[in-house]
Image: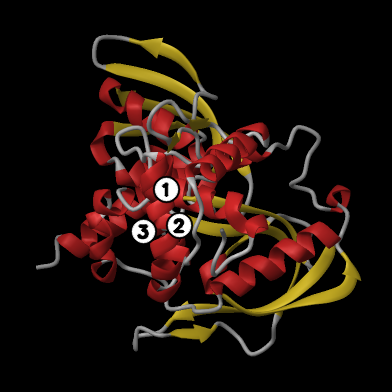
Amino acid sequence: MYAGGSKKLLPMLILEILKEHTDEQHRLTQQEIINNLWTQYGVKCDRRSVHNNLEALKDMGYDIFTSRKCYLSERDFDDAELRMLIDSVLFSKILSQAQSKRLIEKLIGLGNKYFKDTVPHVSNLPALFHSDNKQVMLTLNDLNKAIKAKKKVSFIYNSYGTDFKLHPKRKEPYIVNPYQMVANNGRYYLIGNYDKYDNISHYRIDRITSVEILPDTVKPKSDVKDFTTDWTLPKHMAEHIYMFGGESVTVKIRAEKYLMDELIDWFGKDFRITEEDDEFITVILKCNVQAMKYWALQYGDSVEILEPDTLRNQIVDDIRTMLKKYLKE
């Protein structure tokens, strides 16, 4: 009865046919399953065998609708979830174009044949900016291993030159204690500690090459001053919106009310509104000094830093310098 295949494989072959050819809008009769078994896999069987194996798959926990016509009604990822994952890869700035294309093809393969027609935007991939670092996936894997094993790493840290290519920032490798990898503004960062110092530092993962996992155990977090007793990753990310290193300070801001959306987007909801009128709000939050300066300059005359004075004075100096450049005679 079975030609070109093993009876033991029949349930998995039927499952593959359901994955590829069916969803709630596209269903197969048992005869159509039989036809696909023959055309795709060279396997012959009868309707009773199909029925029995469908029931066996259901007993194994697969959610298969079998009334009159059959379809696989539950998958690991539904179409909306797959689209979200594909778009995340498509607009990722840390992967090379080839890595993005390969990963997207794998994600598309998780959907059925009808899903492929719903993602034509993937053709835009070559027009988007992607990293020139072809070691990113290996870097991610090595850093993950090091973090899990609590081992130090060495790596070359790179930056772009005027030839638009990545070059080492220095000849000697960085020795870093790796603690966490995070995504921020479409980029991946390593949160770690440069071994010579006692503070937290951030490293763009797409700028890291030649990772080596060292035999030395990472420095305890208790020896890194930025890992205070109230340190949490969400708090750290909210205070380091541009992933600058350095201390965080309490900042008092006067902002136009329309910036409420922007404040929440950048800082989450961990800030206080102390004053409010029809046009302005006064906000108190905690943020990295350098990041706060850039954020305030970004929103120009819609924001005023009230405190601390040191930050306010830095912004005044930057504005004066900018003014000189733009008022050249």
Residue 294: x and y in percent read: 40, 49
Callout 1 touching callout 2 (CB < 8 Å):
yes
Rendered residue at 22%/61% (across/down): 324
Q: Nearer the viewer, mark 3 or mark 2?
A: 2
**Left or right: 40 with respect to 258?**
right
Q: Is residue 101 above or below residue 74?
A: below
Q: Which residue is mark 2?
A: 37
Please identify the quadrant where the N terminus is shown. bottom right
**Left or right: 123 with respect to 102?**
left
Q: Is residue 208 above or below residue 112?
A: below
Q: Give the image's coloring scheme.
A: secondary structure
**Left or right: 164 with respect to 247?**
left
Residue 257: x and y in percent read: 29, 20
Q: Is residue 206 above or below residue 319?
A: below
| Residue 31, picture quadrant | top left
Q: How would you rate the neighbour count of disc 3 (Cα within 10 Å): few for under 14, some for 14-19, many for 20 or more?
A: many
Rendered residue at 76%/72% (across/down): 153
How far is mark 1 from mark 2, CA to CA?
Answer: 6 Å
Q: Secondary structure at mark 1?
A: helix
Q: Amino acid at mark 3?
A: Leu
Q: Secondary structure at mark 3?
A: helix
Q: Which residue is mark 3?
A: 90
Q: Nearer the viewer, mark 1 or mark 3?
A: 1
**Left or right: 56 with respect to 252?**
right
Q: Secondary structure at mark 2?
A: helix
Residue 296 disc label: none
Label 1 or label 3, whichever comes before in sequence order: 1
Front residue of 189/70: it is: 70
How far is mark 1 from mark 3, CA to CA?
Answer: 35 Å
Q: Which residue is mark 1?
A: 33
Q: Amino acid at mark 2?
A: Leu
